[in-house]
Amino acid sequence: STASTKHDRKQLAAAYAPDRVPRILFAGEATHQQYYSTVNAAMETGIQAAKTILSTIN
């Protein structure tokens, strides 16, 4: 949406963590707080999600 806000993107990027452990993570250009709608944003959020997964399983 052209009317989406930073708050909307933050909600979209929020992990599902019912027991305070992230179980479902979201990444992609629409979830980046600053550079949404770019390939770089998709890559950065994907890397961040991967790091979160690795820190959760280690």
Image: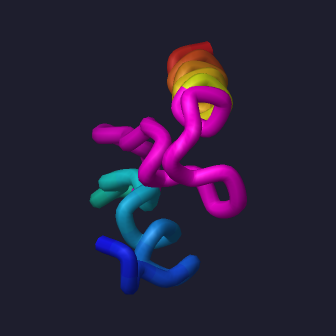
Q: Any magenta on residue 52?
A: no
37 or 10: nearer the eye?
37
Q: Is residue 52 above or below residue 10?
A: above
Q: Any magenta on residue 27?
A: yes
Q: Which residues are magenta?
A: 20-42
Total tally of numbered discs in the picture = 0
Q: Quadrant of the C terminus?
A: top right
Q: Quadrant of the N terminus?
A: bottom left
Quarter of the rendering containing residue 18? bottom left
Horizontal side of 45 relative to 13 (left or right) equals: right
- Please name the residue shown 50% across and 47% down the image: 37
Residue 30 lies, in percent from the top left, at 43, 51
Residue 10 lies, in percent from the top left, at 51, 69
Quarter of the rendering containing residue 12? bottom left
Quarter of the rendering containing residue 47? top right
Horizontal side of 3 relative to 43 (left or right) equals: left
Residue 46 lies, in percent from the top left, at 53, 26
- Please name the residue shown 57% across and 39% down the image: 38
Residue 51 lies, in percent from the top left, at 65, 23
